[in-house]
Image (tube, rainbow, N blue to C red):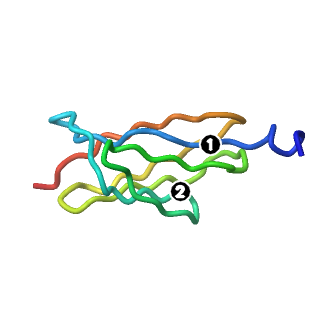
């Protein structure tokens, strides 16, 4: 259904170390009720999402401070890159 797919969104981005700028793999990325891990290039992507405001994005990796971000999704692609701060 073209009308339905026109109202869908995707959320994607890269997760990096805030100091070294190194892309981080195997980072847990939680968006609302969905959980995925970043790939070897620090990339994550959620597809076929409902548009909406003030949605929760949570990013976690051992030895880093957890980061929570509020996201407003619009129709189409939404890019949210995340810089994690080391907890050491």
User: Eyeballing the image, is 77 above or below 87?
Assistant: above
- Secondary structure state at the residue bearing disc 1: strand
The residue mark sitting in front, 2 or 1, is: 1
Which residue, given by chain and number where applicable, does mark 2 sit on? Answer: 31
- Secondary structure state at the residue bearing disc 2: strand
Foreground residue among 23 and 65: 23
- Residue drawn 36% across the image and 52% down it: 67
Mark 1, Cα crowd under 10 Å, few <14 / some 14-19 / many 20+, is: some
- Residue drawn 88% across the image and 40% down it: 2
Q: Residue most toward the left?
A: 88
Is label 2 in contact with label 1 (beta carbons under 8 Å)? Answer: no
Quadrant of the image occupied by residue 28:
bottom left
Q: Which of marks 2 and 1 is nearer the N terminus?
A: 1
Badge number at residue 48: none
Total numbered circles: 2
In percent of width and height, residue 79 lies at 51, 34
Mark 2, Cα crowd under 10 Å, few <14 / some 14-19 / many 20+, is: many
Which residue, given by chain and number where applicable, does mark 1 sit on? Answer: 10
In percent of width and height, residue 19 lies at 16, 36
Quadrant of the image occupied by residue 62:
bottom left
Give the CA distance from mark 2 to mark 1.
11 Å
Q: Residue most toward the front?
A: 40
Instruction: Name the side, left or right, on which 20 lies relative to 45.
Output: left
In percent of width and height, residue 75 lies at 72, 36
Instruction: Name the side, left or right, on which 82 lies relative to 32.
Output: left
- Residue drawn 66% across the image and 45% down it: 53
- Residue drawn 10% across the image and 55% down it: 88
Instruction: Name the side, left or right, on which 8 lies relative to 13.
Output: right
In percent of width and height, residue 58 lies at 44, 56
């Amino acid at each position: 259904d073209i009308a339905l797919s026109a109202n869908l969104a995707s959320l994607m981005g890269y997760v990096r170390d805030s100091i070294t700028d190194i892309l981080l793999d195997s980072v847990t990325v939680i968006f609302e009720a969905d959980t995925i891990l970043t790939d070897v290039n620090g990339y994550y992507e959620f597809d076929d999402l409902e548009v909406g405001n003030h949605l929760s994005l949570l990013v976690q990796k051992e030895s880093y401070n957890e980061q929570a971000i509020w996201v407003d999704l619009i129709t189409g692609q939404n890019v949210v890159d995340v810089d994690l701060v080391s907890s050491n």
